[in-house]
Amino acid sequence: STEVDARAHLARGRVVQMEWDAARFAERCASERVTLTSLVPAQVFDLVRGGHAAPASVRAVLVGGGAFDVQLAQAAAGLGWPVYGSYGASECASTIAVADGVASLELRLLLHVSARAESDGRLAFRSPSLLTAYVLPDGTLADPKIGGWFISEDLGSVEGDSLEVIGRGRDFVK
């Protein structure tokens, strides 16, 4: 994805791509000396179900794209996978908040992101990493921000630097 390529470029790293297979993923992480990776909870489940231990090279696994169960996080940690729940949006160049461990998976906003909950419960974000505009099918640009804030379709709450996501405001396909 574009976000993964951008993160790798900024970190002076490289992207290792492959079709998903939990055993091959664990092996490839070891052979390529992978240090950082992003997975969805279903992939973490596959690693745990298969009993695949993390290679020593892996420093962090950002887990996003859906709810990340604390028991699954603890099982993955038991296999050596340094998992960190995360929340992000393409409109904010991917990551917005990351958990500081597997015990609670409480999401903490990254330092460059401000967040608030709108009166209807939708989460809004402001950051230097926010998109400039969407490119519409006719080639024109549309800036979705209102007063510098991007209002997402995700519902949740914000307390200080703590972010809780509780679901979607409406169904849509990304």
Image: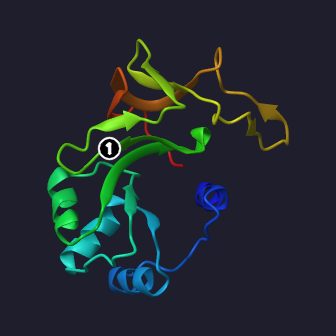
In the rendered structure, the answer to whether residue 123 lies left or right of residue 68 reads right
In percent of the image, x 65 and y 55: which residue is there?
Answer: 10
Q: In the rendering, at what x and y percent does residue 87 appear?
A: 41, 43
**Label 1 Cα crowd, 10 Å radius (few <14 / some 14-19 / many 20+):** many
In the rendered structure, the answer to whether residue 125 lies left or right of residue 50 reads right
Mark 1 lies on a secondary structure that is strand
Q: In the rendering, at what x and y percent does residue 29 appear?
A: 43, 79
Q: In the rendering, at what x and y percent does residue 152 appear?
A: 51, 30
Query: Which one is nearer the viewer's eye here, 173 or 162?
Result: 162
2, above or below 92, in the image: below
35, above or below 154, in the image: below
In which quadrant is the N terminus drawn? bottom right
50, above or below 122, in the image: below
Query: Which one is nearer the viewer's eye here, 85 or 35?
Result: 35
| Disc 1 target residue | 99
In the rendered structure, the answer to whether residue 58 lies left or right of residue 140 reads left
**How are the residues colored?**
rainbow
In the rendered structure, the answer to whether residue 136 lies left or right of residue 47 reads right
Query: Which one is nearer the viewer's eye here, 139 or 132?
Result: 132
Q: Can you see residue 67? A: yes
**Quadrant hosting residue 116:** top left
